[in-house]
Each structure stands twice: as C-alpha cells, then as structure tokens.
Amino acid sequence: MSGKNCRDFFSFLFTKIILLKKPVRSKVQTRRKPFSGRGPKKSPVRESTAWDQAARWYDALVGDHGSDYQKDIIMPGAFKLMNLTKGDQVLDLACGQGVFSRFLSSKGMQVKGLDVSEELIGFARTRSKPSINYHLADARKPDTFKEAHFDVVVCLLALQNMEEIETIFQNVSRWLKPDGRFVMVVTHPCFRIPRQTHWGWDEEKKIEYRRVDRYASDLSIPIITPPVAGSSGHTLTHHRSLQTYFTALAGAGMWVEGLKEWASKKESQPGKRAKAENRARKEIPLFLSLCARPVPAKPDKKS
Ligand SMILES: C[S@@+](CC[C@H](N)C(=O)[O-])C[C@H]1O[C@@H](n2cnc3c(N)ncnc32)[C@H](O)[C@@H]1O
C-alpha cells in the first residue's frame, strides 16, 4: 500500500511523519520561575509543554470541526459508544484545541475540557462558546475536579501522548459517577506502531499485508512535531500493548464493557493493487476504542 492511503500513526492528522532516532524524556510538568525581586510580582510562568510548541500547527490542522478521520470515524464513533443523554456532564480529557468538546456541546451536553498545553487551551477557548469550561491542568493531578462529577469521561487520540496512564485512569475512575463510563480512542496498538509496523506487498499471493516487528514491549517513540523542515521540537508516542491498557484499567477499578475497531474509510486510486489495498485497509483496523465502567462497590457485609 502506498501514497496517501497507507500512512501510519498521525496519518489522519499529519501530512508527513518524522521520527527521531533516540528516545527522549518528555516534559509535561509545570515549573515556577524564581521571582527576581525587581519590579511588580509577575504571575508564575509555566514551562511550555511539548504540545505548546506544536499548538499553532495542530490547531490549523484540526480547525473548527476536525480532520477527515475525526469527522468521519472518530467523533461519531466515540459519540455512539458514549451513549449520552442530553444534559450529561462530560469531560473531554486531553481536549487539545477543543474539537470534540465543541461537537459534544452542539449535541446538548454539559462539557468540560482539560489539557496540559496552555497554547492549545488558548485556541480551544478562542474557538468555542463560553459555555464550554476549559481547564489548564495535568491529567495526572487528582484534584482538578470533584469526585464522582462526570457521567462520561472521554479521551480521543491522546493516551498515546500521555505518560503514566495508571495514574490517569485512577483519576478518571475518581471523577466518574458510580454508573459513569470512560470512552477512549487510540490508534490501534496491535497494527499501528510508529517504526514497528509497515504495509507490505506479497507478490506471490498478490496481497497487501501488515508487518508487525514489535508489539509486546511498551515503547516511547519521539516524533518531530510539527513535522516541518527545521522543526526541532518533538512529541512522544507511547506504544502500549492491550495487556498494559487492560491491566491499567483494572488497576483503577474499571472493567471494559465495549470494544470497537474502526477501519479507515479511504479508497485507493484505481490501479493493479487497488482491490488488495482496499481489502487490507478494511481487514486491519486503524483505531481501537474502548468503553469502560467503574466496578460497582461490593455491598458492606456488616449491613
Ligand atoms: C494528539 S493531541 C489530541 C487532542 C484532542 N483530543 C484531539 O483529538 O484533537 C494530544 C493531547 O494530549 C495532551 N496531553 C498530553 N499529556 C497530557 C497530560 N498529562 N494531561 C493533559 N493533557 C495531556 C496534549 O497537550 C495534547 O493536546
């Protein structure tokens, strides 16, 4: 499979992917600059996150309503899985510039967005109605919201950019109402791993296949973002196996009630390999979505 139709991770967003050779440690913490002692006391300055330096580019790419993949597959698919009722309290976790928050708000939900990138939260606020409440915070911090506040927490295309999912899932579980749901969408961890999975052509069988070089090891893969010449910034893609995701969900007291795998809807240009390419694209999904719920508390034996 070649050209536009076969790009791997980020293909739905990015026009080009550039991978760095060495693993790099990410920085998503905030830090206060020391007060100099001269002049009026300034508000604390946050250290920029990896996504801050890519925010302008990412915002232009996604726009008001999302990329084709977001509009055609991810947002309608996640919305269905969320099974919402008008007026539900929803948290868009790692909301970026707020594309899904706006989608949910337009469907009548009470939406809050959370993201660690000050720049992206800035774009989210500019592009959205004031009724959407955006929070600049790290998802690893437990005290951003009250316990049991949300009917649904949703996280689209971001867990692979987030560190410490065990801590994050604990917070999701903490913020969900007892009968709430957590919906997550990631690029499929079995078939879409930067640098470790590729399309290939079997000349003998005349089939398009997907080659998987590594899967079981969790990996952190640096990717130059934005993917433009001269760019020095990078973001990290954290590949995790299904086992890692399910273990982290269980560790946070959640069980998986639904799983959907979504294929790309793209079609190859007419040609000798088009049929095989289209079949491979349908057989080997691009996205994985899960719907999880908090495990109900056991009744107290004494009562
Ligand atoms: C690929 S963007 C996805 C944004 C949005 N969900 C979308 O679908 O357009 C990944 C996002 O994860 C956010 N992020 C990464 N680590 C985070 C953390 N620890 N807490 C909150 N947001 C985080 C980044 O700032 C970035 O906005």
Image: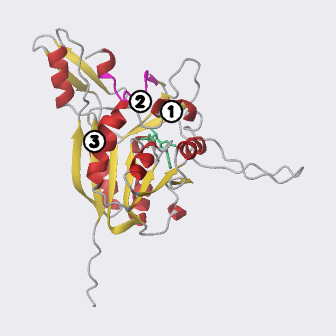
Residue under label 2, please give it.
Answer: 13
| Mark 3 CB near ligand 1 (8 Å cut) | no
Residue holding disc 3? 288
Q: Position of residue 297 (x, y in %)?
A: 29, 74
Query: In the displayed structure, would residue 162 be above or below residue 276?
Result: below
Answer whether labels 1 and 2 touch (C-beta < 8 Å).
Answer: yes
Mark nearest the camera among 3 and 2 is 2
Q: Is residue 174 above or below residue 108?
A: below
Which of the 4 quarters of the picture holds residue 11? top left
Which residue is located at x 22 percent, y 45 percent? 260
On the question of residue 188 being in view, the answer is: no
The residue at label 1 has a CB less than 8 Å from ligand 1: yes
Residue at label 1?
A: 58
Q: Main secondary structure of the magenta part?
A: loop
Q: Earlier in the sequence, mark 1 or mark 3?
A: 1
Query: Where does the magenta region start and end?
Result: 6-18
Inspect the image, locate mark 3, and give the three-letter code of the amino acid beneath it: Leu
Q: Marks 1/2: CA distance?
A: 8 Å
The structure residue drawn at horizontal position 20% and vertical position 11%, both measured from the top left corner, is 270
Marks 3 and 2 sit apart, C-alpha to C-alpha, by 16 Å
Q: Nearer the viewer, mark 1 or mark 3?
A: 1
User: x and y percent of residue 105 in the render?
Assistant: 42, 52
N-terminal of the pair, mark 1 or mark 2, is 2
In space, the residues marked 1 and 3 are separated at their CA atoms by 22 Å
Foreground: 173 or 130? 130
